[in-house]
Amino acid sequence: MSTRHDVLKGSWKQLRGQLKEWWGELTEDDVIRIDGQRDKLIGALQMRYGWTRDRAEMEIDRRLLEYANAQKEPMR
């Protein structure tokens, strides 16, 4: 299991609202259906944005990496 998958599944409750900020075309129903599953998020992004699977995976990886790095930063 990849680290990115761990971030998605392990932080799902916190990420639910973040997903809609990142990708405003996702509906609440999409978020409920995705339920922390990477493949379902990929499919939803492909459907809502018309992206290829590779593009959707790149976008997810980028956002989750940014999210994970932000969680590691010390509070100011």
Image: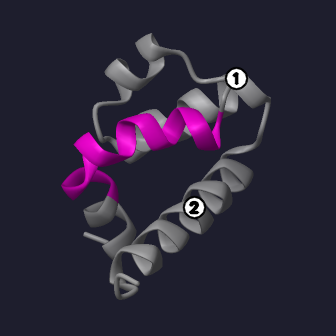
Q: Nearer the viewer, mark 1 or mark 2?
A: 2
Q: How far across and down, in percent of the image, does residue 67 sit? A: 46, 66
Q: Estimate the x, y position of residue 6 in percent, counting from the top left.
A: 26, 64
Majority secondary structure of the magenta segment? helix
The crowd level at tag 2 (other Cα within 10 Å; few <14, some 14-19, many 20+) is some
Chain part drawn in magenta:
8-23
- Magenta run includes residue 9: yes
Residue 33, image x and y in percent? 35, 20
Task: Pick whichever, 75 or 55, lies toward us.
Answer: 75
Split into 4 quadrants, where in the image is the N terminus? bottom left
| Label 1 or label 2, whichever comes before in sequence order | 1
Q: Nearer the viewer, residue 37 or 32?
A: 32
Q: Are marks 1 and 2 in contact (CB under 8 Å)?
A: no
Which dot marks residue 2? none
Report the residue at 66% width, 56% height from top. Answer: 59
Mark sitting on residue 48: 1
Q: Amino acid at mark 2?
A: Arg
Please tell me whether mark 1 sits on a helix, a strand or a loop.
helix
Q: Say what amino acid the circle numbered 1 marks.
A: Arg
Q: Label 2 belongs to which residue?
A: 63
